[in-house]
Image: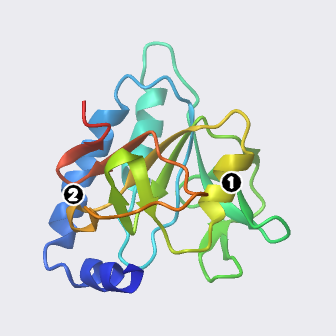
Amino acid sequence: MRKALIEQRLAMPDRLTRADLLQRVMRIWLVGRPDTVIGAYWPIKGEFDPLPALHRWKEDGELMEETQRRRIGLPVIDKVHKTLTFHAWYPGCQMEEDAYGIPKPKDTELIVPTLLFVPCVGYSAGGYRLGYGGGFYDRTLAALEPRPFTVGLGFTHGFLEDFEPEAHDLPLDAILNDNGVVWPTS
């Protein structure tokens, strides 16, 4: 199922248009959120790229009447515990590849997000996501105290009507796609 969804995502002829729509959904969704530290991800395999919307969110904080110092973090893999920590990211910061070939911030400060955007290969009702199968986000969310508000990001094609979560799967607090808010439904 994962492989098919990734192939479909990579083959979407309108992926850039859908990405632009999801950028807009994300920016609107962020309006009024109290968070000043947000964790995200570096997009791979045709994933939606949340970083332009987050950079704009960060800049908007600097323009507020009472300036807010907003921070963005990207994941760094803890190989021992197979979890993720988040390190400060900003456009132009020095990057290096992790063990999986994914760019990560190099030598930046560890930050603790209160809001975490996670990529979805697929997703379903109830806030469940299908990832790549490594369990990094599930282990990370189970270990983080306090747990950040979690938001899945994916394209419309990734909705799985018959998805059955496994016992270790933790539901996300919200899911956004290029059509808007998918979860919660009310």
Res. 50 in view? yes
In this rendering, the answer to whether 9 lies above or below 155 is below
In this rendering, the answer to whether 45 lies above or below 21 is below
Q: Position of residue 113 (x, y in %)?
A: 63, 40
SS for dot 2: helix
Res. 93 in view? no
Nearer the observer, 111 or 84: 84
Q: Position of residue 147 (x, y in %)?
A: 64, 37
Residue at x 14%, y 79% (from the top left corner): 13
Badge 1 is on which residue?
140
Q: Specify the quadrant that holds the N terminus.
A: bottom left
Q: Specify the quadrant that holds the C terminus.
A: top left
* Residue sitting farthest toward the right: 80
Q: Position of residue 162 (x, y in %)?
A: 29, 64
Q: Is the image coloured rainbow, by chain, by secondary structure, or in one colour? A: rainbow
Nearer the observer, 94 or 137: 137
Q: Quadrant of residue 43?
A: bottom left
**How packed is label 1: few (under 14 Cα within 10 Å), some, or many (20 or more)?**
some
Q: Nearer the viewer, mark 2 or mark 1?
A: 1
Residue at x 39%, y 86% (from the top left corner): 3
* Labels 2 and 1 touching (C-beta < 8 A): no
In this rendering, the answer to whether 6 lies above or below 161 is below
Q: Position of residue 19 (x, y in %)?
A: 25, 61
Mark positioned earlier in the residue sequence (2 or 1): 2
Badge 2 is on which residue?
20
Q: CA distance from mark 2 to mark 1?
A: 29 Å
Amino acid under disc 1? Thr
Left or right position of 51 against 19: right
**How packed is label 2: few (under 14 Cα within 10 Å), some, or many (20 or more)?**
some
Amino acid under disc 2? Asp
In this rendering, the answer to whether 22 lies above or below 166 is above
Residue at x 75%, y 67% (from the top left corner): 82
